[in-house]
Amino acid sequence: DFLDVLQDVALWLVPALMEGLNKLGPDISTGNWGKSISEYAELFPSTRVAADHTFKSVLEATHLMIQSHPSRRFFLTGHSLGGGIAKMVALQIPIASRPLAIAFASPGVQDAARVLFGHENHDGPIQTRLEDLQQSLLDVVPRHDLISLIDQDPGNTLIAPCEGHPWQCHSIFRILWGIFSACGSMTFKNLTLPCEAFRAAIPDAC
């Protein structure tokens, strides 16, 4: 709902401000400066976030699915802020049962995680959990996308082809069209997508 969206935006407000300041002066998003600013961001009312309104319901549903089907392999995925939430959920699941998180055109979680979990020590220190996330995170970053520049990620990055303006390249339809156009479906039976299915979102697809 609208409150969830506001909480998500607030969660990445501090990382976005830090990235903006980095363009004007020295890099303050790394090292002790970055850790301190992120962890004490809750002192500012506009950046206070609550886990209940960011990802708790998704985390609970993920735990339930893993417990109900322990032999299955699960994936967490999302686009834009949804991709950021998918990564946050993966960060809270023990590495032995953690699903692979695949995020499309989403902000990073390195500083945002410290904003949300900076003073929590359960399941290991936040820095350890961030380092462990490298093994179970894939970021799909379209060229020219601006949202992907917010914050940093510890995982693997796949640069997706995109020809267009930043707001066009942020579109999940254009991202998927670029991947399918360059790589095909990458399955044993190469699937095809009719360009008409993307025409509304990508006028130049056909």
Image: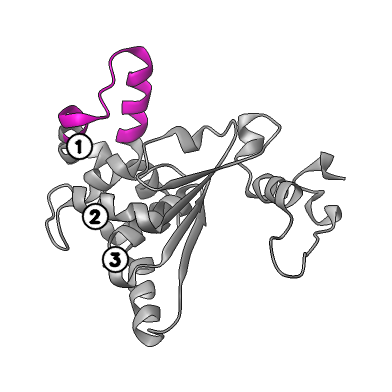
Q: Residue at x 37, y 22 (%)?
A: 20
Local secondary structure at mark 2: helix
Question: Closer to the camera, 59 or 178?
Answer: 178
The 10 Å Cα crowd at callout 1, few under 14, some 14 to 19, many 20 or more, is: many
The 10 Å Cα crowd at callout 2, few under 14, some 14 to 19, many 20 or more, is: some
**Which quadrant of the rendered structure holds the N terminus?**
bottom left
In the displayed structure, 6 sits above or below 34; it is below
In the displayed structure, 101 sits above or below 74; it is above
Question: Closer to the camera, 69 or 7?
Answer: 69
In the displayed structure, 91 sits above or below 64; it is above
Mark carried by residue 41:
1
Q: Amino acid at mark 3?
A: Ile
**Which residue is at the far top?**
25
Image location (x, y in percent) of residue 34: 22, 31
Q: Residue at x 70, y 31 (%)?
A: 164
Q: Amino acid at mark 2?
A: Arg
Q: Nearer the viewer, mark 1 or mark 3?
A: 3
Q: Is residue 26 magenta?
A: yes
State the residue position of label 2.
129
| 77 on left or right of 119 | right
Mark carried by residue 16:
none
Question: Disc 2 versus disc 3: distance between alpha carbons?
Answer: 9 Å
User: Which sits earlier in the primary sequence, circle 2 or circle 3?
Assistant: 3
Question: Disc 1 versus disc 3: distance between alpha carbons?
Answer: 27 Å
Q: Which residues are magenta?
A: 14-35
Q: Is residue 16 magenta?
A: yes
Image location (x, y in percent) of residue 33: 17, 27
Image location (x, y in percent) of residue 57: 35, 68
State the residue position of label 3.
95
User: Which sits earlier in the primary sequence, circle 1 or circle 2?
Assistant: 1
